[in-house]
Image (spheres, rainbow, N blue to C red):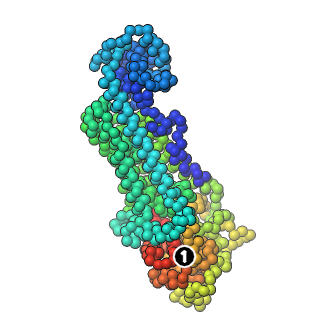
Amino acid sequence: MKIVTSLGLLALAFPGPTTALIGYGIPMYKPNCAFACRSIFESAMLMCSTDEVMSGAHSHGTGPTPPDCRAQDESWLTTLAYCINATCTDVAPWRLEKYWADKNTGDPKVQPKWTYAQTVAVLDKAEKPTEELGEDDMIMSTLTFDHDTWEGYRGTLAAFENAETMHSRYGIILLVVGFATPIFFSVLGYLPWMSTLIDKLKPRFVYPAILGTYHVRALPFFLGNAPTIGQTFYIAMFLILNIILTSVGYRSFNPNLWFATQWQEIMGYISARTGVLAFALAPLVVLLSGRNNILLWLTNWSHSTYMLLHRWVARIFTIQVLLHSITEYLLYKDMGEVATEQVQPYWVWGIVATIAVVITVVFSTLYFRRLSYEIFLIGHIILAVITIAGCWYHIEIRFTRNWGYEFWIYATCAVWFSDRLVRVFRILKNGVRRAEVTDVSEDIVRVDIRDIRWAAEPGKHTYAYFPTLNPLRPWENHPFSVIPTALLTSRGHSIATATSSSSTGSQHSQTNDVEKMGPLATVTSPVSIRGSTTAGVSLYVRKSTGLTKTLASNSSLLTLLDGPYPNNSTSGVLKTDRLILLAGGIGITAILPFISHHQNVKLYWSLKSSAGGLARDLDQAVKNVREREVSVGSRFDVGAMLDKEESEGWKRIGVVICGPGGLCDEVRSQVAKRGRMGKTVWELDVEAFSW
């Protein structure tokens, strides 16, 4: 099911033979010579024409002459065939017949009464035409054509099709680069000769933040989360790529018979380019935010990284949308057609999509996310639906699925719906569960869900639904670290080597140092494994605003689980000589699953004095860690602690940290600094839910 989320991208990568994108399955004006002939005569009236208004740009609508009129009018057929026969001398006859059948009348369902070959045969028996079409003339007999006019249309059509092909090409490039870059850099890590280089790059680019030590912590004034240096490189690369692909590849044709000036022509190309690039970014924006983002399994990048990239790619998407709207407005204003076009339904839907995108970006800022995350999330989804609907009707009304622009929308919807579908499958697979909720402290509860059999892997989280807590919003859910319930009572994990100087921590645990151990030494865990199974998971939930505030003791709470999902790749820290586990407060819940997956573990856990309930509840699980230091009421000196571990001479040390943002950022900064300066190789895993 992990592969399902990529179907939208595959639909673009492997288009069908007849419908895809312009230049990639959809020819616009081929054969060019024949389209130029039709352009000369298509606006002329026939004897059977009506008074209907002409259709919009490059839609090739029927205009005042309906298809059945063209199909039966012999003057139209012979005039068009004469021009094609005279100019398309190097085009295969079958291509001309196909063009004749598809484009002659303006509707492929309405076929002309003569085939192209039959019409040429009629011309061969008639006299060669000498009269050209006048400005206000009707086509009442076979007419000849002005070669300069034909050349003007040929060049205009060729330039326009070349521009549209470049739009498609650059859109594909943008989507592929955005999708493939994480895969490329992840694959590099598996090359044996890259290991030493990557060890040197991580503390210089992967771990450090771009702005001081801010990363998990938000920047002042709700400016959001600063990316790391490596994330900044991706963002900068992608932004520069967008600028380049927006700016290059334009070729003008003069004299252009569609645009009055070269400025109008280039502005028309830019408006179309920015629209296509925005469409190409849409499926990537949705993919990066998804829980079932296939990149989570194909790469070693974290979920929080993809959420950060989602926000930045969405901002670039918004810029492209705004550029498209602005350049379209300036173009039509210069052409004197704004008043006419802005009341058209396609224009109105385009404005709806543009406004929805801008509102989405504004209300996705950190201030509004923290003000009420549930309201933000629902509003975010509604605005996204409005945006996609606006884009769909914008192109559907304008082009009626003639040019493949809708394939970008299909890809976006495929990614979104497949993610939701896989979520439903995961919930159904886990089944309807009844959870036991136990008060651990005044603001923390433990939720035990029995008989869930998940692999006891560290670095996982799940989304929990409690539908009966708020029947008016049963869809609300939150992410929580996953702890195998058996881990809370099992024994014998993480036996450290006796040579480590961290035996000091072990000594503390044996002497029950009150300052270090607090209440841990005298109280046993209330968690028990009943019956003949150890299957189950436990979630520790800190009550806050919203859904979690209503959690209270309950022996049978209806619970649905969507998961488990990976937080970060844990392979790096688990392949080290020494694993340091650092937890702040309830961050211990993300740390505990690591203790049974490494042979040489040291646990550091700092708690507030008020967190006695949590400490008592996890007493047995923490005691299973032979080397441990627990500090109640004070935080560890991170620098001194890392210096002590480094002085032991371990060649490779892994550090896993979960806790308050300030602690996570301090550890990140300290590990990065030591990785750059010392001989020890450091691996870092920050288990932070800051999305």
For the residue pair 574 and 411, the one nearer the viewer reads as 574
Mark 1 lies on a secondary structure that is strand
* Location of residue 224 (image quadrant): bottom left
Residue found at x 72% / y 68%: 533
User: x and y percent of residue 198 in the render?
Assistant: 50, 67
Most foreground residue, 538 or 565: 565
Q: Residue at the far right: name it.
A: 532
Q: Can residue 517 be seen in the rendering of this structure?
A: no
Does 167 sit above or below residue 577?
above
Above or below 51: residue 433: below
Residue 249 left/right relative to 600: left
Assess disc 1: are there few (<14), some (14-19) or many (≥20) residues with their C-alpha within 10 Å of its C-alpha. some
Q: Nearer the viewer, residue 658 or 608?
A: 658
Q: Residue at x 29, y 17 (%)?
A: 134
Residue located farthest toward the bottom when viewing the structure as drawn: 511
| Res 665 → quadrant | bottom left
In front here: 389 or 305?
305
Q: Residue at position x 31%, y 17% from top?
A: 133
Q: Is residue 189 above or below residue 610?
A: above
Camera sees residue 49: yes
Kind of residue at disc 1: Arg
- The residue under the point 37% across, 54% down is 240
Q: Where's residue 637, x and y in %? A: 46, 83
Callout count: 1
On the image, the x and y values in percent for residue 495 come to: 64, 80
Left/right placement of residue 128 relative to residue 540 reads: left
In the picture of the structure, the residue carrying the numbered disc 1 is 652
